[in-house]
Amino acid sequence: MPWWSKHSSKDEKKKSSKESIIDAFNRKLGFGSEDKSSCRSRKSRRRRDEIVSQRGAISRLPSRSPSPSTRVSRCQSFAARSPAVPLPRPALRTAVTRIDSGSQRPGSNASLPLPKPHGGASNVPDSSGAEADFTTASVSSGSSVGDNPSDSILSPLASDCENGNRTALNISSRDQPIHSNKNSAEMFKPVPNLSNKNRRPLGTHVKNLQIPKRDLVLCSAPDSLLSSPSRSPMRSFVPDQVSNHGLLIGKPYPDVSLLGSGQCSSPGSGYNSGNNSIGGDMSTQLFWPQSRCSPECSPVPSPRMTSPGPSSRIQSGAVTPLHPRAGGSTTGSPTRRLDDNKQQSHRLPLPPLLISNTFPLSPTYSAATSPSVPRSPARAEATVSPGSRWKKGRLLGMGSFGHVYLGFNSESGEMCAMKEVTLCSDDAKSRESAQQLGQEIAVLSRLRHPNIVQYYGSETVDDKLYIYLEYVSGGSIYKLLQEYGQFGENAIRNYTQQILSGLAYLHAKNTVHRDIKGANILVDPHGRVKVADFGMAKHITAQSGPLSFKGSPYWMAPEVIQNSSGSNLAVDIWSLGCTVLEMATTKPPWSQYEGVPAMFKIGNSKDLPDIPNHLSEEGKDFVRKCLQRNPANRPTAAQLLEHAFVRNVMPLERPLVSAESAESMNVVASSTMRSLDIGHARSLPLDSEDTSNYQQKGLKPGLGFSTSQSPRNMSCPISPVGSPIFHSHSPHISGRRSPSPISSPHVLSGSSTPLTAGGGAIPFHHQRQTTINLLQEGIGSSRSPGSAGNFYTNSYFQEPRQPRSSPRTPPHVFWDNNGSIQPGYNWNKDNQPVLSDHVSQQLLSEHLKLKSLNLRPGFSTPPGSTNRGP
Ligand SMILES: Nc1ncnc2c1ncn2[C@@H]1O[C@H](COP(=O)(O)OP(=O)(O)OP(=O)(O)O)[C@@H](O)[C@H]1O
């Protein structure tokens, strides 16, 4: 039998299995039976077509594709040839094989050898790597997926599968005698230098750890950058490069390698794609073959994604023209095929103009009612499906479930995050994983909170599931930590408060997240925090048993490791405490230990992690309360919201200042300055209570924070607009969504102001905001109404770029005492802009005035100022 015939029958079998998985998934999502049956009939028709096609028959189905392009596909190649003549392997056969590697059958002669693990004790044999991976996936997932108590005997070591550490773990089962190859002192020895070469297999047997009844678990990380040939750009990364990779994809910890067993997801493992989690992530291992199936495993988006080449949707969706599913099944037109295979599970998001008023899943919305009409075949290729108006963009990150891309709706201009999961495993466990994904969707679709990433909808297209989520562009806390280092206390308080706010909401719905950690907390440019990744979330009912072994080891609560029953929701509180430490130090607690010892520390010792000294007493107390070993002693999220550490948290975001409101602000600000005998103002907009509040709390009213701060309000996406000045005097601002991209670290830190932020050009409205805040901080000056906003910005921020000879209008002007406009700049002999003398003098004199008033940045009004206006 020619090789392609064998392949064909296998493909057929695989497709049938896969489709049943997808069917099951759609059943899970409540896809209608009518639709299902019609879908099935379409599918069976398609399968017939595929069979014919794959046998080399010429497709008789006329293309309904509007595309003038002809798809290049294997079946079409076959069609053009005599079926009796064995075809040479396609030029891209290797790529195809790699794509299929996850689902390769043993013996596939095209299999690529898998890279050997670094120091792994039991490398997966190259020749059967794919199979071994499958085995692993099956084993580990079998131990982890599911929430019944029996599931919880999963060994944490199995999480190696997520870590990219292809390591053999010799783990004794729970009912075997517990002994250790190392004494505990050795085991707890911190790892000074965690590097790849230090990786070693662990044969340790850890008391009380949940251990599967398997003697040997070959954990293979499907997402491993080291092991996946599909992720070629990352494979060659050395550890320090992995750090960059981590940043690139917004995933795990490059700074601490998972050593030895690698069984626990190391917070430092940069070799995974962010799969620091155990449990839910096992489904990834079920899906990982698909992950590897996809040419988009590469973190660098394939040019195919955007190229207007053949097999457009598949390109956009990620499959090369030679992908068996692409080529082999594209007997009909692409359009038809998409229609046949697209199974919408949830309605798709609204365009921006509507989304503000209507929930994406509302009955008033239907994806079908506003189909995206591609303008050209090339553009159509970027869409996920004809019915979907979302076009897949760049890769945002990789998780254990799949890849997350930026989605763009070119009709509406809206963006979203598209989580793409391939459902193409033959493994029976993939059903379970699909079920879990369905569970994630089910959980997310019921949530609507400003601190929880919003679910828009989902759909399945062919063998891919797309989950559409609110796009949070700032990346994860983890990524920010890696890029910018540890957070200041104010940021920690703020983020913690927002996470708590989301958790309080979640817990009120009796839902536990189970994977709270920096990598799963996203931040937008305004400093708004969104809890993401609900792959492990679970709705807790009265019947729920103890939580199964799920989570990310370093953030995992002791009771989860010990498999003891406890108050389930409290596991998130423990993880939150770890996340606070992570924000304060860039690493989670016990990250100096290897995975298993770290888990032992968490689960079996009485030790508490080190709390950094630089954290305030309130912060330390907050962490201690979260890290109570007895879950019953941990406060609830709602209670913690009242903790001093977060109660008076200051929002990071700045208020929106519209042109109109900015004008009124300037008036107010000007008045403020006059009241301070700066300029001619006489009134002060702050009332005494506000002022005293600030003084009591040592807060800076000028940072845009409200005196009547409601922690719960702050996280509202409708900007609460913190400043008391703005609240009381600027109704324009109140309740507006702040688009301000400024959440200036300069101001937040209090160490510097935008004045010192360099001479970069800042959009005018930002300058105004900046100035307003400066004014609130009591260091601004105004020459006349409306001038305050320009004074400092003119002087310090914007230097005109034009050469003197170029015709220009003075970019900014100053106001003199009479309201006359004065040029803001002079030019020195070097043709450099300089401040007008009078401006410099004014600045100096007013600085002296401020000093004489004992003012300093951060205080709008001196204590007990007698300069209050009427
Ligand atoms: N809504 C979003 N907006 C922007 N980026 C996102 C969004 N969701 C996810 N990402 C990016 O994609 C990465 C992977 O996403 P996510 O963690 O949800 O996937 P996962 O498969 O569930 O991962 P995990 O391994 O943590 O379970 C994130 O680290 C983040 O960088």
Image (cartoon, helix red, strand yellow):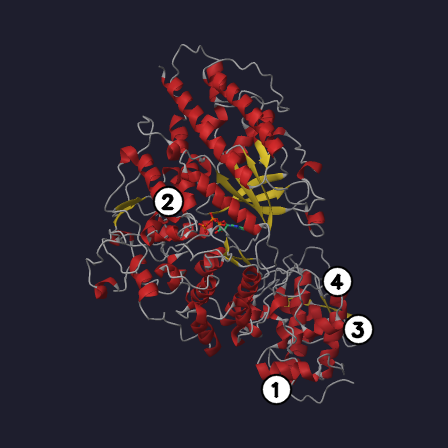
The mark closer to the camera, 3 or 1, is 1
Quadrant location of the C terminus?
bottom right
The mark closer to the camera, 1 or 4, is 4
User: Which comes before the other along the chain, label 2 or label 3?
Assistant: 2
- Residue type, label 1: Asn
Per the rendering, the mark at residue 142 is 2
Return the x and y of residue 124 as percentages of the image width and height.
27, 40
Q: Which residue is drawn at 33% across and 42% down?
A: 136
The mark closer to the camera, 2 or 4, is 2
- Determine the secondary structure under disc 4: helix
Q: Which residue is drawn at 63% across and 76% down?
A: 701
User: Which comes before the other along the chain, label 3 or label 4?
Assistant: 4
Per the rendering, the mark at residue 659 is 4
Quadrant location of the N terminus?
top left
- Residue type, label 3: Gly
Say which quarter of the image contains residue 26: top right
- Determine the secondary structure under disc 2: helix
- Residue type, label 2: Gly
Q: Disc 1 and disc 2: Cα gap in Å?
A: 68 Å
Q: Mark 3 points at which residue?
A: 819
- Determine the secondary structure under disc 1: loop
Per the rendering, the mark at residue 335 is none
- Determine the secondary structure under disc 3: loop
Return the x and y of residue 675 as percentages of the image width and height.
73, 83
Q: How crowded is mark 4: few (under 14 residues within 10 Å), some or many (20 or more)?
A: few
Residues marked 1 and 2 touching at CB (< 8 Å): no
Residues marked 2 and 4 touching at CB (< 8 Å): no
Q: Mark 1 points at which residue?
A: 854
Q: Disc 1 and disc 4: Cα gap in Å?
A: 32 Å
User: Which comes before the other along the chain, label 1 or label 2?
Assistant: 2
